[in-house]
Amino acid sequence: MEIKKIAVFGKKYEKTFDDSIYFFFTALQKMQTEVIIYEPFYNFIKEQSNYNPEPRGTFSEKFSAESKPDLVFSIGGDGTFLECISFIGSCEVPVVGINSGRMGFLANISKEDLPAAMIAIRKGQFSLFERKLIEVSSEKPVFQSFNFALNEITVQKRDSGSMITIHVYADDNYLNSYWADGLIISTPTGSTAYSLSVGGPIVVPGAGVFIITPIAPHNLTVRPIVVPDNVELTLKIEGRSENFMASLDYKTEILETSTILKLKAADFKVITLKFENKTFFDTLRSKLMWGIDKRN
């Protein structure tokens, strides 16, 4: 993979990350590539770190086929990574997540891992990994800026009152009516996010499935279910309220209960980098602290 142009996306970070920012851009200079930075992030770096990385230019809009870079770095947490995806869109440009905080499954390169990761990228010691997205559509316009989710789509009751009922169909087959606070439909990538926090299973990225996980269901025998992602899911919502809340990764909209949502696998993917010495299972053990026992 030839890297001639690199884009850097990011949000605010703490002062403790200043040294890592300086190291990161110094490492990019050694790669002798064209570097562009998300304009608000570039302004923040100069103010926060009193440092000018001197990019070739800045960007503030989605990439097009003509303007797309060869590689994108996302600096922040998983939320920043998800927002970064909306700038890449369907261009399928590989993206690398650098974590400026404490925890991240998508932004999984820590400050400590950064030097080794930059060397591996410069030497081409990585492979490309495809992650599927969920596309949401309706007869009424929804999430018009970017109607795709890398992690999940969630439908929830809008207030603290009565629950809502979500009728779910897989293709033309009736699956279930969920009487609950809400419902999460996640990708394997999103299985370690919101779905996990309400009891959903962990699914290895790359599996061709959707995970359907209810939020506080009234019937306790209703459990999460995994379905193949070659089906189209239909969601019909009922409730006492005239509206419900729908979230697509980091974006939220209030929709009328008459809105019928259609979900399917997107026809493009998110490309991430997979390093030779780091696996998904390594990340699980590190982030979820598997195997750590105070008795040992």
Image (spheres, grey):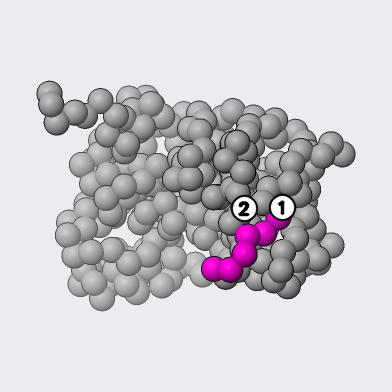
Residue 241, image quadrant: bottom right
Q: Is residue 133 magenta?
A: no
Q: Are marks 2 and 1 in contact (CB under 8 Å)?
A: yes
Q: Which residues are magenta?
A: 160-166
**What's the residue type where badge 2 is placed?**
Ala
| Residue 138 falls left or right of residue 243 | right
Tell me where residue 220 appears, x and y as whole percent.
57, 40
User: What SS does tag 2 mark?
Assistant: strand
Query: How far across and how far down the image is residue 125, in percent?
Result: 38, 28
Identify the residue under disc 1. 166
**Toward the viewer: 70 or 174?**
174
Q: Residues within 10 Å of mark 1 (few under 14, many from 20)?
A: many
Left or right: residue 77 compared with residue 250: left
Q: Quadrant of residue 64?
A: bottom right
Q: Is residue 184 visible?
A: no
Which residue is found at the position 73% from the left and 73% from the top? 242
> What residue did someone put label 2 on?
180
Tell me, yes or no, whether the highlighted magenta stretch contains residue 161.
yes
